[in-house]
């Protein structure tokens, strides 16, 4: 019989008790939800009445693909958003999976390659200072905050309203 729990934790009382004390996980999941909402709004800008596409019914990966196929985002941004989603899936489906600084720093570097603008290049250029100044939570916040703003600028370029003033 195949062991479906290999490399996974079964839920325990500790997982429930730690639910609200894992700030990086909460920030990551909330940031992901915000980006997903912005993607839906982007897609809606290019929908016609004849289409039977319901953006809320699409997975995050499908939303990214639809946005890319309609030239709302470029392939670098699509690749970065897929990386965000892959990590979200890993965190959501593996209880106790830690978010390490190495992982978020690498994501910040990928964000920058995708064109995400940061007010402080330390976040994605200097790992030691980034960890010292921002820690995991700060880098997560910067990644999602700046990505949401950049997607909002893209939305504005396509006739939508800027979301984050």
Image: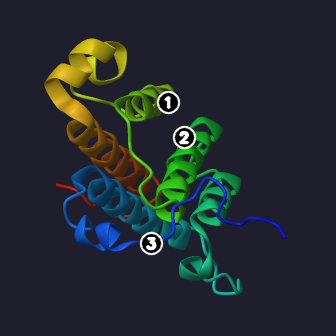
Q: Name which residue lies at 45% across and 64% down.
A: 36
Disc nearest the viewer among 3 and 1: 3
Quadrant in the rendering for residue 33: bottom left
Is 123 situated left or right of 59 in this image?
left
Q: Outermost residue toward the right?
A: 1
- Circle 2 residue: 80
Residue 93 sits above or below residue 105 on the image: below
Q: Locate residue 83, reporting x and y percent.
A: 56, 44
Dot 2 surroundings within 10 Å: few (below 14), some, or many (20 or more)? many
Give how far across and how far down residue 100 sits, in percent: 38, 36
Q: Name which quarter of the figure residue 121 lies in.
A: top left
State the CA–CA distance, disc 1 to disc 2.
6 Å
**Camera-nearest residue between 32 and 72:** 32
Q: Which residue does the numbered mark 1 point to in the structure image? A: 110
Seen in the picture, residue 91 relative to 45 is either above or below; the reply is above
Mark toward the start of the polypeptide (3 vs 2): 3
Q: Are marks 1 and 2 in contact (CB under 8 Å)?
A: yes
Q: For label 3, count other residues whose C-alpha is less than 10 Å away and answer few (under 14), some (14-19) or many (20+).
A: few
Mark 3 lies on residue: 11
Q: Is residue 23 visible?
A: yes
Q: Nearer the viewer, residue 120 or 103?
A: 103
Tell me the distance, in whole angstroms, between the alpha carbons under discs 3 and 2: 30 Å
- The image's colouring method is rainbow
SS of the residue at dot 3? loop
């Amino acid at each position: 019989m195949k062991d479906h729990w290999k490399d996974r934790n079964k839920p325990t009382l500790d997982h429930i008790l730690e639910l609200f004390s894992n700030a990086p996980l909460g920030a990551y999941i909330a940031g992901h939800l915000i980006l997903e909402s912005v993607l839906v709004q982007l897609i809606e800008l290019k929908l016609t009445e004849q289409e039977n596409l319901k953006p809320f019914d699409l997975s995050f990966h499908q939303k990214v693909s639809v946005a890319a196929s309609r030239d709302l985002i470029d392939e670098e941004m699509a690749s970065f958003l897929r990386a965000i989603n892959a990590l979200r899936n890993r965190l959501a489906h593996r209880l106790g999976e830690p978010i390490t600084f190495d992982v978020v720093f690498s994501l910040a570097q990928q964000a920058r390659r995708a064109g995400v603008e940061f007010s402080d290049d330390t976040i994605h250029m200097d790992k030691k200072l980034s960890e010292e100044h921002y820690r995991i939570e700060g880098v997560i916040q910067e990644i999602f905050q700046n990505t949401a703003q950049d997607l909002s600028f893209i939305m504005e370029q396509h006739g939508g309203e800027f979301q984050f003033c």
